Amino acid sequence: MINSIRNWRIFTFTSVLTINILALLFLTFSHWPEWWRNINFEDSHLTWFSSIQLIMIGFASISCFFWSTILGTYNSFVDKYLFGAMGCGFIFLSLDEKFMIHERLREKVFIPNEIGTEITGVGAGDFLHLVIAAVGLVVSYFIIKQIKASKLSLTFYCCAVGLALYSVITDATMPIPPADAILTEAEITTGRLHQFTEEILETFAQAFFLMSFINLSFERLELFAIKYTNKVEEDL
């Protein structure tokens, strides 16, 4: 039973990485030579893929919360509900990805009211990305304390945080030209490549978050199985 859980753990997070790589390759080359077409836009096929992946991260995080509660692997109130709150956060991000909540806030609230439009180096209204990143870093401090015993989950999580942070900074600082601006072909290509890179990094960040939580959840399932097996043997 323990070996079966370990095999499924390895198979699952390996499948996540493989599916992400294949999906990105397919979406990039299926519309060649317009390689950016299925990646860059907010209503692209990648947006659908990302929204599904984000909700899976949410459920994987809630699974970690479930096993933490059963096993009692927490030391405080914050530790107890950390993964549950994290899961709800990722489910919200899934809805944001699908329904473009923060983009609508930017276009209909922040920019018209000149909220956060004068921050040097940050696109008009894109300060919200930096706020989310700051909150994420604070939460990550507590998450890392929880998962540091699992070297593989910790490695995946740190990769995810690094990629996500770089992606957020890339997105927030991406220049958005006026609607009536006349751009050269080189400027258009540079803008497409900038957006393409940000979307790829964001997708891999999601993959590493999912792999981290899947691995941790399976490890806690394995720990539960070991405790249950030992208890049965003691009763015999």
Image: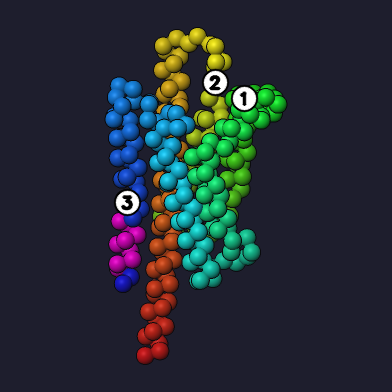
Q: Nearer the viewer, mark 3 or mark 1?
A: 1
Q: Quadrant of residue 169?
A: top right
Q: Quadrant of the C terminus?
A: bottom left
Furthest residue toward bottom: 236
Residue at which label 2 appears: 176
Residue 14 tag number: 3
Q: Is residue 69 above or below residue 185?
A: below
Q: What residue type is labelled 3?
A: Thr
- Kindly indicate whether the residue at mark 1 contacts the one at mark 2 (C-beta within 8 angstroms): yes
- Residue 195 lies within the magenta run: no
Residue 38 position in % (x across, y down): 37, 30
Judged by its main secondary structure, the magenta piece is helix
Task: Work out whether residue 57 or residue 222 is closer to the camera in this orientation and state it.
Answer: 57
Task: Work out whether residue 64 or residue 23 is closer to the camera in this orientation and state it.
Answer: 23
- Kindly indicate whether the residue at mark 2 contacts the one at mark 3 (C-beta within 8 angstroms): no
At a point 33% along the width and 33% down the height, the residue shown is 27
